[in-house]
Amino acid sequence: MLFEHKVDMDITAGRTALVLVDIQNDFLTDGGKYYVMIEELMKSNNVNANLETLLQTAKDHGYPVFMSPHYFFPHDHKGKTRLGPMEDLALHGGVVARQSPLHTDDLPGGGADVPDRFRKYMEDVNTTIVSRHVTYAPTNDLAYMLRRRKIETVIMAGPVANLCLEDHMRNLLRDGFETVMVRDAVAAAANEEGAGYDAAMINWRFMANAVWNTDETVRRMIEAARTPATT
């Protein structure tokens, strides 16, 4: 029997945030160390343009933005346990590598930095850059910072749909947040077993409160922002 059940999903402007993961050069910029694995989907889904549309809508209509970055530091190479294949490749391939957690001298323009086209959105006072996540999960202060803003619903997007983004989604669901996933503001790598993007879409359809495209998400964000708040 095919699973076809859906739930009604609305957003409330004062309780909703845009949560982005891995908005960094190595993932989003031509020539980035991870970008080479997701380039085809980045282009076919028009991911960068869709991410910018979501960000501009959030800024225009008062939605707070949160971004969870991924960094590797020299001490990460001192681990004794074996890593999974993708994390091992990323760590030893220099993806989002930084020289130190205590300074940012090497950050500007590097693979771990924010792409120039998104910088004005990331440096805005209504954007919160949380501490780094490790492996794929939000092992950081994301949920806490969302709670501080009394956020209940998160709209989520980012370039690593089936790994970092999905693990953030799973953790936020566990913490009681409603999740809306934006299907064309994401990408994913593939391996001999199949496409990571397909894996993400299948899981999100089962788990997320809603899976919308960018146009639908923007329409609903604008409608919610125009709806008077109720207590």
Image (cartoon, rainbow, N blue to C red):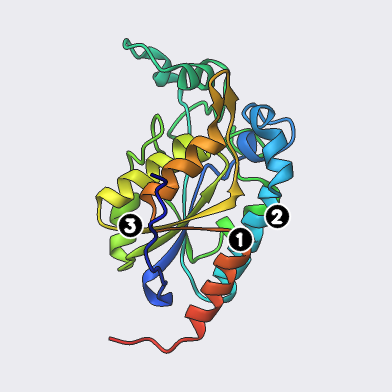
Marked residue nearer the N-terminal end (2 or 1) = 2
* Disc 1: which residue: 214
Mark nearer the viewer, 1 or 3: 1
**Quadrant assignment for the N terminus:** top left
Q: Nearer the viewer, residue 131 or 50?
A: 50
User: For the residues marked 2 and 1, what is the alpha-carbon distance in whole angstroms?
Assistant: 10 Å
x, y (%) of residue 25? 64, 38
x, y (%) of residue 10? 41, 72
Marked residue nearer the N-terminal end (3 or 2) = 2
x, y (%) of residue 91? 50, 20
User: For the residues marked 3 and 2, what is the alpha-carbon distance in whole angstroms?
Assistant: 27 Å
Question: Which residue appears at 70% of the width and 55% of the height?
Answer: 49
Q: Is residue 70 above or below residue 116?
A: above
Inspect this view and state whether residue 70 appears: no
- Dividing the picture into quadrants, the one containing residue 6 is bottom left
x, y (%) of residue 193? 53, 21
* Disc 2: which residue: 49
Using the image, tell me which numbered label, if any, was put on residue 192: none
Question: Which residue appears at 55% of the width and 65% of the height?
Answer: 217
Using the image, tell me which numbered label, if any, was put on residue 145: 3
Mark nearer the viewer, 3 or 2: 2
User: For the residues marked 1 and 3, what is the alpha-carbon distance in whole angstroms?
Assistant: 25 Å
